[in-house]
Image (cartoon, grey):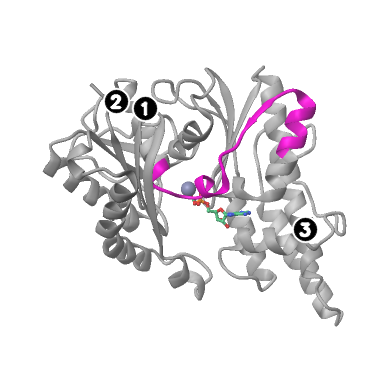
Amino acid sequence: MSAPVVLGVETSCDETGVGLVSDGVLLGDALASSMDAHARFGGVVPEVAARAHLESMVPVVRQALEAASLDLADVDAVAVTAGPGLSTAVQVGLAAAKALAFALDRPLYGVHHLAGHAAVDVLEHGPLPPRCVALVVSGGHTSLLLLGDLARDPVVHLGDTTDDAAGEAFDKVARVLGLAYPGGPAIDAAARDGDPRAIAFPRALSRPSDPPYAFSFSGLKTAVARWVEARADAGGEVPVADVAASFQEAVADVLTRKALAACREHRVDALLLVGGVAANSRVRALAEERCAAAGIQLRVPRPRLCTDNGAMIAAVGDLLVRGGAPASGLDLAADPSAPLTGALLAGPWT
Ligand code: KG4
Ligand code: ZN
């Protein structure tokens, strides 16, 4: 018998993603985004995102099946982001996944969105090592984690952000600089022509007395806003490329320094860098440089798999199915602020 095919559904933010994975292999996926509809608001509007998911869901399921050359009848299990994320957005995906699981009479696996970000690397670089440090950097989260078997072991939090997520800082700084939403890719592009040493922005929580694996980006965001304001007040032109490059350098420096320190302290020789901000060219380059110098293997998915997509949810579902995890059941509720303790978000009955 061939390995089970898992269909994954992702709708936690503004991307409607569907992927099909079997035995660690991506068979096909499809993505629709409502990003353009949010651009003029400078951030995701939950009701607009939820409505867009509702409109895109069936076409995206069809496209993903077509890309994989599969029929719905070939699907053996359905995995879905049950949280964290925007409540109404998560609920659209969850309802769709339940409908599919019910109609096909297949098990449903409610999964944690961030576990999906980590699991997606399996599709590109093969099975995860028995232990690794994962730096999850997205629009809503910034966490340093110690991972074992993603399907079975609890996730250990080494540190999290105390205020803004790294991606949120990119989005807010982009707004200050008058760059387009989403801010991450816009800053990444603007920084290419800038000098990362032009302005010495602060590296928060970097003193020896600070918690070693906690992050804070709110002060950095304020420092950038103040610097830009002061320059504008003095009648000067704001050097957007230099500000973008210097800000990006500060984020990349803190993220990678703390991630490497965690690897060293926990004697882990593999670092997994995932989430939307892992698509950032400077974060990737600095992580590569520092991992190479420390003899640590860096695993970072290609940029398209770093930002939200359906393949990542199918990937974590595939790990759960192969690991023999219990299905979630069709009364699974959305959990918009689910803490990351494990990959599976079980129902309230367990
Ligand atoms: O993981 P993701 O797609 O969605 C969440 O789960 O939040 O991450 C989105 C975040 C946004 O804040 C976006 O600005 C940021 O990832 N991002 C980037 C880049 N591409 C996306 N940040 C920096 N550089 C990039 N190239
Ligand atoms: Zn995400």
Part of the protein shown in magenta: 287-311
Local crowd size for mark 2, using a 10 Å CA cut-off: few (<14), some (14–19), many (≥20): few
Q: Is residue 205 visible?
A: no
Q: Which tag, 1 or 2, sits closer to the chain's start?
A: 2
**Is 220 drawn above or below residue 230 in the view shown?**
above
Secondary structure found at label 3: helix
Query: In the rendered image, which residue does mark 1 sit on?
Result: 23
Local crowd size for mark 3, using a 10 Å CA cut-off: few (<14), some (14–19), many (≥20): many
In percent of width and height, residue 126 lies at 50, 27
Q: Which tag, 2 or 3, sits closer to the chain's start?
A: 2
In percent of width and height, residue 203 lies at 77, 46
Secondary structure found at label 1: loop
For residue 94, side relative to residue 246 (left or right): left
Q: Which tag, 1 or 3, sits closer to the chain's start?
A: 1
Q: Amino acid at mark 2?
A: Ala
Residue 302 shown in magenta: yes
Q: Residue at x 85, y 82 (%)?
A: 235
Marks 1 and 3, Cα distance to the nearest angstrom?
A: 40 Å
Query: In the rendered image, which residue does mark 3 sit on?
Result: 245
Query: In the rendered image, which residue does mark 2 sit on?
Result: 3
- Depth check: 76 or 51 in front? 76
Quadrant into which the C terminus falls: top left
Q: Residue at x 79, y 56 (%)?
A: 246
Q: Residue at x 30, y 66 (%)?
A: 51
Q: Residue furthest front?
A: 69
Q: Are marks 2 and 3 in contact (CB under 8 Å)?
A: no
In percent of width and height, residue 196 lies at 82, 55
Residue mark closest to the camera, 2 vs 3:
2
In percent of width and height, residue 315 lies at 40, 35
Marks 2 and 3, Cα distance to the nearest angstrom?
A: 46 Å
**Is 346 drawn above or below residue 265 in the view shown?**
below
